[in-house]
Image: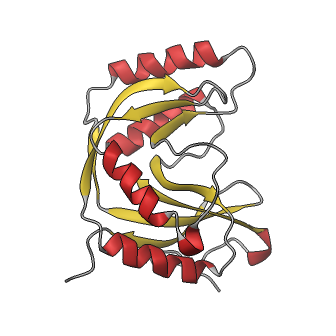
Amino acid sequence: MDFNPHGVLSRIPAEQRLNVFALVIYIPDPLGRFLDDLRRDLVPGCNPHAHVSVLPPRPLAVDWQAAGEQVRVCAGNWAPFDIVLQRIRIFPVTNVIYLELGQGETEMFRIHAAMNSQALEFDEPFEYHPHITLAQEIPPGQAAAVNRRAQELWDGYTGPRSFRAERTAFVQNTLGNCWIDLAEFSLGAVTV
């Protein structure tokens, strides 16, 4: 039996879970709620949970709890930091529309480099670029229109455009492309 970080029994059976894991920092409300709504507007039918990836999806050669221990130790030695969101951009090869990070980007590169080792090491298909995905797998020829809509919604947002990165979540993908939380780790939780 697996439990989520809140002690609730997971409803996804083991045989439906993939050997695909990621480490993310969830974006708190009200910014997180706005970004989830924005993503649903751009990609109807998706089930978003706004986040920035510390470690993009990867397989593990060890049990997830062993990899989670590595995350716990590294996260515990990492001080919380602020992330400020800037402008909307498009990755040229994949047409993924995303929000670029300003303040906090350097910390994301550093924490990624520290975490992408030992049990969590993976030769990623794309160079690491911390961001918040807004739309992906856009039908051919529609990226420009989706990008314009994303820009319009982001320009109209009057709430906070920053958040404090204080916790990471270790997540696993499933056959239905539904990500489930396995464990949560606080930044700076290890005392010296």
- Give coordinates of residue 25: x percent, y percent: 41, 56
Residue 154 vertical position relative to residue 35 in the rendered view, above or below: above
Q: Farthest residue toward the bottom?
A: 1
Is residue 10 or residue 27 the one in the foreground?
27
Quadrant containing the N terminus in the rendered view? bottom right
Instruction: Count up the numbered dots.
Output: 0
Quadrant housing residue 92? top right
Where is residue 159 drawn, in percent x and y?
26, 33
Q: Residue at x 21, y 82 (%)?
A: 191
Q: Residue at x 32, y 74 (%)?
A: 76
Residue farthest left in this picture: 192
User: Between residues 74 and 14, which one lies in front from this camera angle?
Assistant: 74
x, y percentage for residue 114? 42, 64
Q: Nearer the viewer, residue 153 or 121?
A: 121
Q: Could you tell me if residue 36 is visible in this image?
A: no
Residue at left 74%, top 23%?
A: 139
Residue 127 visible in the snapshot: yes
Above-or-below relation of 33 to 76: above
Residue 3 percent across, percent down from the top left: 56, 80
What quarter of the picture does the C terminus occupy?
A: bottom left
| Left or right of residue 11: residue 167 | left
Q: Is residue 59 left or right of residue 39?
A: right
Q: Compared to 133, does 80 lie above or below? A: below
